[in-house]
Image (cartoon, rainbow, N blue to C red):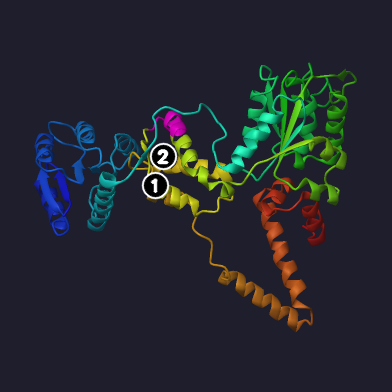
Amino acid sequence: MERVLIVDDEPGVRHFLKKILDRDYLVAAAEDGETALEAIEVAEPAAILLDWKLPGISGVELLREIRGRLPEAAVVVITAFGDTDTAIQVIEEGAFDYLTKPLDLDTVREVIGRGVQSASRGATAEILTVAPEERLKGHQLIGNAAPMVAVYKQIAQVAKLDVTVLIRGDSGTGKELVARTLHRYSRRAGGPFVAVNCAAIPENLLESELFGYAPGAFTGADRHGKAGRFEQAAGGTLFLDEVGDMELVLQAKVLRALQDGTFQRLGGSDTLHPDVRVLAATNRPLEELVGEGGFRPDLFHRLNGVTIELPALRNHLDDLPDLLTHFIQRFNAELGLHMRGFEPAVVELLAGYPWPGNVRELENTVRRAMVMSKVDYLAADAVRDQLPAPPPAVGTIDPRCATLVEQAIDRSVAEGVAPYATVMAMVERMVVKSALARSEGNQVQAAKLLGITSTTLRKKIEEYGL
C-alpha cells in the first residue's frame, strides 16, 4: 500500500483525515513541520496533506523543504482561505493541488487518489530527457524526416537567388518560418524582413498598407504621408502571407510592382523604385481561384516561378520527438518552466491524432500541457487533456440534426417537392449563415472557415439572400 502523510496541528482534522484514508493507504500523521520532516525520513510518502497554517515551520517553508527532499511526492495543501492569492502561491510553490476547509470527504479521496497515482507513475516513469539549454535559438524549422529534408534542399537551392518564391502548405505548417529562413540565407540578410498578412488587414486598408500614401490622400491621413511595406522592405525581403485572399484590384497593382519594380503611393504621383525581393505564401488552391476568376493568372504565374511545398504534420510524424524537444526547450526558456523531458507514450499519443492545425496546433498543445502540468515532465495524461475529444464515429449523426432533416424531408414530400435539393439547400444555408456569424461578417475569414473560395461564398450569399 502507498503511504500518505497528514500534517495538521488540529487533532480533530488529523483524526478525520486518517479515518477516511486508512482503508486505502498506510497513513501517518504529524502535528507540525518538525515532526513531518522526521516522518518523511523514516518512510517516504507518495502523497502529503499539508495544512497551510502551522506553528513553527510555516506551511510554505515546509512545502519548499518537502519539494527539495521528495520531488515526486504529491503535496496537497489544506487552507481555510480559498482566495486567489493563496491559490496562486500554493501552485507556484509546487503543490500538486489544494483543498479549502471545510473539507469534503469525496473530494479528499479523489485528490489524494490522483496525487498517489501521479507520484507512483513519476517515480517509475521512463522519461526521455531534454537538455536544459535550447538546441536552436528562436523559431526554427524542425525535423529530419524525408519531407522536411526535401524542403531544406529547396531552400538551399533558391535562398541566394533573387527570385520570387511561392510557399504553399496548409495552415500551421510553418510557411513564414520558410520565408524567414530564405531571407536569413539570402544576400539580403542584412536588410529588413517585412511580413504582411493579406487576410488580416481589411481590403480597404491593404493598399495603403502595402504602398503607403501621400500627404492628404484621404481624410485623417498623416500630413507627412506614410511609407508602405514595399518601401519599408527596401534592400531586404517583403513577405506576402495569405496572398490568395488579396482582392483583384489590388492584385493588379502588386503585379505591376513585381514586373516593373515601381509603384506610386496612394494619392501620390511620384514613381518609387524600391529594391525588394518578394516572397508569398498561401494555403489556398490558387489554380482553382484562377479558374473561378478570383485570382489573376498573370500574378499567379509571376509568383509561381519557384514553389516550395510544405508537408502537413501528419506526413512527417517521425519528427514528433524532435518537435517535442524543441518546444519543451523553448517554453522552458520563455515561461521559466523546468520540464526535464517527456514520456515515450506522449509520442505514441500524438502520432494517433490527425493534426488539422499542423505544427502550430502541436506547439499550442505542448504549451498548454506544460503550463497545466503538475509534474516536472510532459506526461501522456497531461497532453491527452489538451487534445480535443475524438469526433463521432463514421455514420453517427447528431440526433438534433437528424430530427431537422427528417422534418424537412416530411415537409418536402407533403409539398410534392424533391427532398434532396430542398434539404441540401437548407443545410447549406445554415452552414454559410453560421460561418458568417462566427466571422462577424468577414467573408474572407468565413470562406477560410468553410474551406471554400471567397468567390464561391459570395455566390452562396447571393443565392440564399444572406
Q: Is residue 330 magenta?
A: yes
Q: Is residue 303 magenta?
A: no
Q: Where is the N terminus found, in terms of image quarters?
A: bottom left
Q: Which residue is mark 2?
A: 371
Q: Which residue is mark 1?
A: 344
Q: Residue at x 18, y 32 (%)?
A: 58
Q: Residue 342 versus residue 319: which sits nearer the camera?
A: 319
Q: Where in the figure is residue 209, as x and y percent of width and height?
A: 75, 28
Residue 379, numbered circle: none
Q: Is the residue marked by circle 2 packed among few (<14), some (14-19), or many (20+) residues within 10 Å? A: few
**Quarter of the rendering containing residue 341:** top left
Please tell me whether mark 2 sits on a helix, a strand or a loop: helix
Q: Where in the figure is residue 456, as x and y percent of width and height?
A: 79, 54
Q: Earlier in the sequence, mark 2 or mark 1?
A: 1
Q: Is residue 79 visible?
A: no
Please tell me whether mark 1 sits on a helix, a strand or a loop: helix
- The CA span between labels 2 and 1 is 19 Å
Could you tell me the amino acid type at mark 2? Val
The dominant secondary structure in magenta is: helix
Q: Is the residue marked by circle 1 packed among few (<14), some (14-19), or many (20+) residues within 10 Å? A: some
Q: Is residue 243 visible?
A: yes
> Mark 1 and mark 2 in contact (Cβ < 8 Å)?
no
Give left or right: position of 326 versus 217: left
**277 up-or-down from 406: above or below:** above
Could you tell me the amino acid type at mark 1? Pro
Q: Residue at x 55, y 42 (%)?
A: 145
Q: Which residues are magenta?
A: 329-337
